[in-house]
Image (cartoon, grey):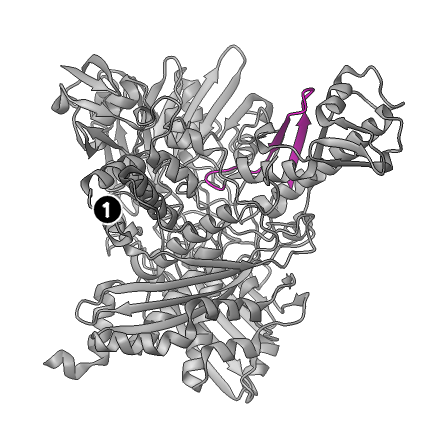
Amino acid sequence: MGNEGIGARVLRKEDKRFITGKGRYTDDITERGITHGVFVRSPHAHARITSIDTAKAASMPGVIGIVGGQELIDGGVGNLICGWMIHGKDGSPMKMAAYPAMDPAVVRHVGQPVVLVVAETKAQATDAAGEIEIVYEELPSITQLSKVLEPGAVEVHPETAPGNLICDWQLGDEAATEAAFASAAHVVELELEQNRLVPNAIEPRAAVASYDTGEDHYTLNTTSQNPHVARLVLSAFYNIAPEHKLRVIAPDVGGGFGSKIYIYPEEIVCLFASKKLGVPIKWVAERTESFMSDAHGRDHISKARLALDSDLKFTGLKVDTIANLGAYMSLFSSCVPTYLYATLLSGQYALPNIYANVKLVYSHTVPVDAYRGAGRPEAAFLIERIVEVAARKLGVSPVELRKKNYVRDFPYQTPVLMNYDPSDFITLMDKALAHIDIDGYAARKADSERRGKLRGIGYSSYIEACGIAPSQAVGSLGAGVGLWESAEVRVNPVGTIEVLTGSHSHGQSHETTFAQVVAQRFGLPIENVNIIHGDTDKVQFGMGTYGSRSGPVGLSAISKALDKVEAKAKKLAGHLMEADEKDIVIENGELKVAGTDKKIAWHEMTLGAYTAHNMPEGVEPGLVEKAFFDPINFSFPAGTFICELEVDPGTGVTEIVNFVAVDDFGTIINPMVVEGQVHGGIAQGIGQALLEGCYYDENGQLVTASFMDYCVPRADDLPSFAVDHIEVPTPNNPLGMKGCGEAGAIGAPAAVINALTDALGTEDISMPATPEKVWRAIQATRPAMAAE
Amino acid sequence: MSEVTLTVNGREVKRDVEDRTLLVTFLREHLGLTGTHVGCDTSQCGACTVHIDGNAVKSCTVLAAQVDGSSVTTIEGLADGDTLHPMQAAFREHHGLQCGFCTPGMIMMAVEIVKRHPQGLDEKTIRKELEGNICRCTGYHNIVKAIDTAAKTMQGQPAMAAE
């Protein structure tokens, strides 16, 4: 084999089907007699449903049936759940209101599904949906986060959560932090907004649900990042069917970014209706449906205060955040603005006192849950913005202020639960400075000035917690599941290998990178290794892909299973060659007796395992091993990003001219794949900073519900990126991997906004910093010019 | 109903379809060519891009009946048997795809971009020309490199250094 092992820039095995149009996504799946479902959704942010008249629709051509919320209740379908129980600072549990898949009485956000229409064709279902008459009694709504907690505000769930407050949560030592502020030499304050984002995977969510009356068995093909978790909750909480009577398949999935973790009402309703109506049903979201029903991300407002001593060492950080969870609590919504956010507020810094108070609230908006980074972008943005503001206020270099406060000794215990992996924050910054050519910056800025442009430079040193997560630790914090991963390695008689993993690839390249790890172990070509994922009938159980966990957790499980395969292979080879198994080495597809010329080919050993004519005593035939890996800690990828941009003061248009990312992801399996993950994450981070904003109007209407109104980055909005890395392996998993999937989205927004405020000479500008907002900021700083 | 006759990937096909049938529906549902994807329904994302008589067109906003008599090429018809089109090969070589969903439309658009710029392409032009195709995974960095490489292969010039 060539170099296809760990660290090799191997081209992807999965590409051929995608570049030739042979990918198999949920919408590409059909079966005999397939029918099509269309949901009728609420046009109101908050309303009581007075009546639903389906008579006319039911008689239209091709219509097979219509299912409403009352039938789900009558059919015993359970409410959706939030799977992470948190407690407020007074010890009380979070206030989780009932979340029916289709509430027959009240709607609480625009786009909430009310009725499913099923017909022979999608066009017929769409026609019939237009003839369903739903009478609503409109009620006042609240969608603006800044007003949700005001006295007298409209309440989303008045009986369960008075005043819209789900949980008043805290982390850290408040008294010690206040004491740090009392003795501080300098205090810097900043108010921040985390703009609401829509994940927008390019493949819309979809489901194909069918029920086999002969077997009393359901099959669901769906756009999921974690089909086993989907099956678990569909079975245990939504009462669709016991797990052995429900197969969930996540075939090729066209991007997720968190939005495809959750089990949504549509899948539940389609499964229920497939049995009730006796037909297989396909539902595919249109883009506007995605905007109105995929879980949104971010949406915080925060006040932050940073205390520094006279030597400019950070001594305290106090944070007050209000986090919008939308109209209902989505599957992991409670942990995102709490345990995935406040635990990262120490950033890359030795910050001895931290206290965070987070108020989680309801509003009449689409539920909010994890979106690429999930809590960690919010934390990184907060700390990296206030550090930058502090540097400017105190007249010190933002680079020097960071370096003065970086953690240097590892492992490092923060005051907010986390125990950091070894890394090297100074080197990350220095490499980033070299890449951006910091020495040439003054000349570049002068050149911009000559051309009438404003140039700025901004830094962001992020850290995140990945490898989600140690089961016992998250269990003690309220998680309803364990967050280990499973693997099964099946070695076939001819020596080829199938690896079954509970991780799921929806763009992350597992079919290649996982094969590289197997190939490395036995010296086999990656062509001989197949990665199987995304089907509950094939893989026994798994927790799926999110939180940059497939490398640190999923591959660790594979690595453990490979240990067992290797041990048995050596035992067999030793027996076949009449040598001690301890003397067997495996390389280049051969098993050799060290120090001799005795060897057998890999496939001779594997065939021997299956013919079983000559097995060691007490050893079973075959060569199949399973493993579960439960991490002992999170992993902590970290990096420094530097953004250099230029603003046209005449138009307010910002152009990013240089963007550098230097990351420590620990061990890297395939640099090409990792760089691709970083590029994509940075693009989403720049999108958040400059382009993407999700808005509701005063009537609760979602006014950004298409790609015409919500600006995801296009190619000409972005530069090429300079990406580099250092590798400080984590000691906490067998391969030393820290995870790389979310880093770009976590580190980029602060780098961009720090650069933009540097260019504009303003303390702050809110995201997304659109040309209009930038132009207005310029006018505000230059009143004389504006008057001319 | 309309009778629609098209030459799709070199093969003549004839179907009776509802007048309102979109070209993308015709390709996906009637011909089973599921390589052409729908990502937005509003002609913004470009995942549905195919070639109609050699021009890149978003098939989610064209009626099948409108293009009766045309020649349509989809992603399934781009390669020459087992030999990938240079644009397909370049997307793989430069890791210009992750989840793969936008990829067919991206490749079909990219082929046309190269054809419309016989004088050659630079990064700025490639980015400008890609404005109608959205990718959420790659940040476009490697797509731009792939198109540059394929353009030079198709036009017989040396490509920019791979990164």
Chain bearing tag 1 is B
Quadrant the C terminus of chain A occupies = bottom left
Q: Residue at x 50, y 54 (%)?
A: A336
- Side (left or right) of A459 relative to A177: left
Residue B91 image-quadrant placement: top left
* Type of amino acid under label 1: Gly
Tell me, yes or no, if residue A49 can be seen here.
no
The location of residue B28, given as percent across then percent down, is 30, 23
Is A685 placed above or below A384 here?
above
Question: Which span of residues is magenta-colored?
Answer: A484-508
Mark 1 element type:
loop
Q: Nearer the viewer, residue A679 or B115?
A: B115
The location of residue A530, given as percent across then percent down, is 58, 29
The mark tally for this picture is 1
- Side (left or right) of A199 relative to A405: left
Packing grade of label 1 (10 A; few <14, some 14-19, many >=20) is some
Is A744 placed above or below B68 here?
below
The location of residue A319, given as percent across then percent down, is 49, 71
Provide the residue designation for mark 1. B120
Residue reaching furthest to the top: A214
Q: Residue A504: within the magenta? A: yes
Q: Nearer the viewer, residue B156 or B117?
A: B156
Residue reaching furthest to the left: A788
Q: Residue at x 36, y 56 (%)?
A: A720
- Side (left or right) of B23 relative to A232: left
Is A501 placed above or below A611 here?
below
